[in-house]
Image: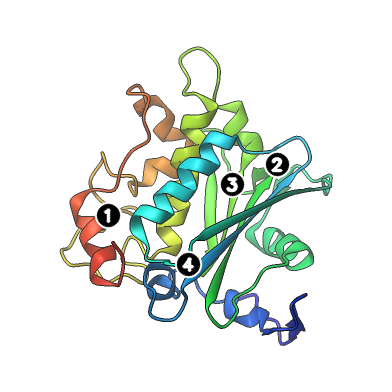
């Protein structure tokens, strides 16, 4: 899906092939989790002007990755803004096109690259009763619908911006890491049959509500949901911590 045949060189002169970052979601589970091939990770955080994620959420994101993956040479984050496309709603195909036009970091011989995009619009899949907060759509790519996140946070009876961003970012990270039944083989049967590729434990980070507006009412504790023991077992069995 969304495959390009072009090859490019990065600024260091090392040949990179963007195709390696245009595979199906979950297919790089072991590469992201283990140090078998990639000893470090670079995370390219790109946001539309005016929709920058909070520093706290990004710190929590990196902490989440560090706690679940083996990257002895570290996890690097680079962050920058891009102009708005002017659109109000987006399909995954349109999000992928924005990535193709703006992504600068791809896998190299020993460093795996992740693209995290914060867009100033909503998902085309939103309805009057349900909204999409984030979506993982490639093996190392996910989008956060930041306009929707901002609209559902930092008001009375709503979670804080930091909390909601952290929850959605780490949930989508869980998908590219292979959860649930999405590249990291399940050690026990815990996939939600009503919401495929999500955990059936309601308190788990990978429960379906974490990436939709339905989950905001369950954040009264003030802390982001954590991975349950079954999801942790899946990651560890596929090379993670």
User: CA separation, marks 2 and 1?
Assistant: 28 Å
Q: Nearer the viewer, residue 100 or 190?
A: 100
How many marks can you see?
Answer: 4
Q: Residue at x 54, y 28 (%)?
A: 161
Question: Pointer 4: residues within 10 angstroms few (<14), some, or many (20+)?
Answer: few
Task: Write down the residue under mark 3.
Answer: 144
Q: Residue at x 42, y 67 (%)?
A: 72
Task: Write down the residue under mark 4.
Answer: 73
Foreground disc of the pair 1, 3: 3
Quadrant hosting residue 7: bottom right
User: CA separation, marks 2 and 3?
Assistant: 9 Å
* Residue 225 point in image, percent of width and height: 33, 38
Task: Write down the residue under mark 1.
Answer: 192
| Residue 179 appears in the figure | yes
Question: Pointer 3: residues within 10 angstroms few (<14), some, or many (20+)?
Answer: many
Question: Pointer 1: residues within 10 angstroms few (<14), some, or many (20+)?
Answer: some
Compared with 97, 106 (above or below) is below
Q: Nearer the viewer, residue 207 or 193?
A: 207
């Amino acid at each position: 899906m969304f495959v390009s045949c072009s090859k490019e060189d990065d600024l260091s002169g090392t040949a990179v092939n963007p195709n390696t970052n245009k595979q199906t979601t979950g297919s790089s589970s072991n590469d992201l989790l283990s140090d078998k091939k990639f000893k470090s990770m670079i995370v390219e955080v790109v946001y539309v002007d005016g929709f920058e994620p909070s520093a706290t959420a990004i710190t929590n994101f990196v902490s989440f990755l560090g706690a679940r993956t083996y990257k002895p040479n570290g996890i690097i984050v680079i962050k920058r803004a891009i102009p708005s496309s002017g659109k109000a709603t987006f399909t995954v195909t349109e999000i992928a096109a924005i990535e193709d036009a703006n992504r600068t970091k791809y896998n190299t011989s020993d460093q795996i690259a992740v693209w995290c995009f914060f867009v100033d619009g909503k998902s085309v899949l939103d309805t009057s009763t349900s909204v999409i907060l984030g979506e993982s759509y490639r093996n190392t790519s996910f989008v956060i619908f930041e306009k929707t996140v901002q609209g559902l946070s930092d008001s009375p009876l709503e979670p804080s911006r930091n909390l909601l961003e952290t929850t959605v970012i780490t949930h989508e990270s869980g998908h590219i890491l292979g959860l649930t039944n999405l590249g990291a083989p399940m050690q026990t049967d815990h996939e939600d049959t009503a919401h495929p590729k999500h955990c059936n434990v309601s308190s788990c980070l990978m429960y379906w509500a974490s990436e939709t507006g339905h989950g905001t009412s369950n954040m009264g504790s003030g802390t982001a949901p954590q991975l349950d023991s079954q999801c942790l077992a899946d990651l560890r069995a596929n090379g993670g911590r």
